[in-house]
Image (cartoon, grey):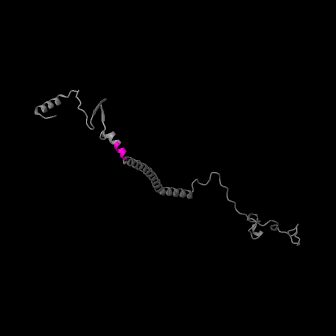
Amino acid sequence: MSAGTGRRRSTGRPLSHAASRPVPAGTRSGAGSRPDARRPGRRTPRAPARPAAARRPLFTGRAVVFVGLLLLLSLTLAGPVRQWLDGRAEIARLAAESTAYDERIAELQAELERQADPAWTAREARERLAYVLPGDRLVVVVDGEAAEGDAGTLPDAVDAAPRPWYEELLGSVADADGEDG
């Protein structure tokens, strides 16, 4: 077969090798789609194969700069972030303190309302200060013995315990001078 002979189209012209392949979408024609290495008489030099020992370095310049920028950014943001966290903790502490003060205020308000009651005041005067109403009888227990008397007074108790010598001396001098004591 000669160069022009072979399969023919229905028009009678010979088919070219490029026309028998499908043309990829987006290309202008099939003429430029053949790789240069397949053209006769033209060879492209191949890149030499890398030896296994010659690898890329672990850290490239870009990676070092990126890590440096990340460190700079973290150091720049560390202060404001710490202040923000401290502020949040302070707000939480103040809120808890405010709640405690609110509870204390409610307790004191309840105590004021209770103290405004005249019956409570009279009861506290009787219990704490030993006050009695007119006509009531006061009974005070001293050392396990009952002592009776008018309101606010106690009967004269007999001193069973001896006084120290210096009190006896001062008492006798006061009696000699005519003083009551």
The x and y percentages for residue 106 are 42, 49
The x and y percentages for residue 133 are 31, 41
What segment carries the magenta color?
117-122
Given the current orientation, which residue lies at the most extreme front position? 135
The x and y percentages for residue 166 are 16, 30
Instruction: Name the quarter where the N terminus is drawn.
Output: bottom right
The x and y percentages for residue 116 are 36, 48
- Above or below residue 56? Residue 121 is above
**Image quadrant assignment for residue 153:** top left
- Return the residue nearer the eye: 142 or 3: 142
- Return the residue nearer the eye: 26 or 38: 26
Residue shown at 50% from the left, 58% from the top = 73
* Residue 118 located within the stretch drawn in magenta: yes
- Above or below residue 51? Residue 12 is below
Q: Is residue 11 left or right of residue 109?
A: right
Residue shown at 16% from the left, 29% from the top = 168
Given the current orientation, which residue lies at the most extreme left position? 177
Q: Is residue 31 left or right of residue 71?
A: right
Q: Is residue 68 left or right of residue 56?
A: left
